[in-house]
């Protein structure tokens, strides 16, 4: 991909914000965060052909084959309460699932909270990072990685040959449309969009918290703040930062 192709994808989505392309970089999220701190406008887009220090959830690394993934980070400046920021990860996941399914002809679905799956194999993921004060959200960076060619990692899969500009434009268009609704309507929009492409709802799952506590239950819904609601033997619980395993 090139900077011109990033601009073309943005133009198709009706966006005119700056773009930054790097053949190789450490992390697109790190670059986008630096730009956000420097005052970059909303929808500034960073892309890379290969990351040497890609980041994942809970401090994990993101591994890619050079030229084999579409990796981008998007700068946002949302007017949302801090409690609603989890919705943006789910919205990005839903927009990617919709765009990837349209571009590839495959069924791409979302595993809560931030994975993209084809069947039970991971084809991509989303990582949101933010800067907050006591009273406001300063900026949010939505980082995304989608495999076109699968890296040699167990459980990874690629989408195959797709039009990268069309894929990225499809994501940007879908994300922008939903993100642009009035803040009071955003939760309902995200819940509806994500639920339609969910791979987790209706599944028996195990949720493991950061403290190691494990709870099993049926994933029945997501709530208005983006938490996954489980029906467990001890009652209904909503999890926010747990790791989720699909049991069957």
Image (cartoon, grey):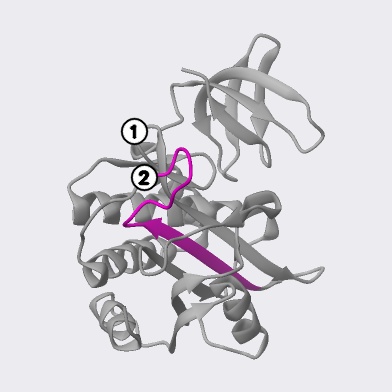
The reply to whether the C-beta atoms of the residues labelled 1 and 2 are less than 8 Å apart is: yes
The residue indicated by pointer 1 is: 119
**Which residues make up the magenta segment?**
139-156
Residue 29 visible at all: yes
As for residue 198 lying within the magenta part, the answer is no
Compared to 96, does 9 lie above or below? below
Q: Is 8 situated left or right of 145 in this image?
A: left
The residue indicated by pointer 2 is: 157
Question: Which callout, 1 or 2, points at the residue further toward the start of the chain?
Answer: 1
Residue 208 at what x, y percent from top left?
70, 30
Q: Is 131 situated left or right of 203 in this image?
A: right
Q: Tell me the SS state at disc 2.
A: loop
Q: Residue at x 74, y 34 (%)?
A: 209
Residue 78 visible at all: no
Q: Residue at x 46, y 30 (%)?
A: 200
Q: Residue at x 82, y 68 (%)?
A: 134
């Amino acid at each position: 991909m090139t900077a011109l192709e990033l601009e073309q994808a943005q133009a198709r989505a009706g966006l005119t914000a700056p773009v930054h392309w790097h053949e190789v970089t450490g992390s697109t999220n790190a670059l986008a965060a630096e730009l956000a701190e420097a005052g970059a406008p909303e929808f500034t887009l960073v892309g890379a052909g290969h990351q040497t220090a890609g980041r994942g959830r809970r401090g994990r690394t993101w591994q890619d084959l050079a030229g084999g993934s579409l990796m981008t980070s998007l700068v946002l400046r949302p007017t949302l309460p801090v409690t609603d920021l989890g919705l943006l990860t789910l919205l990005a996941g839903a927009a990617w699932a919709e765009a990837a399914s349209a571009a590839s002809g495959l069924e791409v679905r979302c595993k809560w909270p931030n994975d993209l799956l084809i069947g039970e194999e991971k084809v991509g993921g989303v990582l949101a990072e933010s800067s907050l004060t006591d009273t406001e959200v300063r900026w949010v960076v939505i980082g995304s990685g989608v495999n076109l060619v699968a890296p040699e990692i167990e459980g990874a899969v690629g989408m195959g040959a797709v039009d990268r500009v069309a894929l990225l434009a499809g994501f940007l268009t879908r994300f922008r449309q939903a993100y642009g609704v009035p803040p009071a309507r955003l939760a309902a929009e995200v819940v509806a969009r994500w639920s339609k492409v969910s791979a987790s709802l209706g599944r028996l799952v195990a949720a493991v918290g950061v403290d190691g506590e494990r709870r099993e239950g049926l994933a029945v819904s997501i709530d208005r703040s983006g938490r996954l609601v489980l029906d467990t033997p001890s009652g209904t619980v909503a999890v926010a930062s747990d790791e989720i395993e699909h049991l069957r």
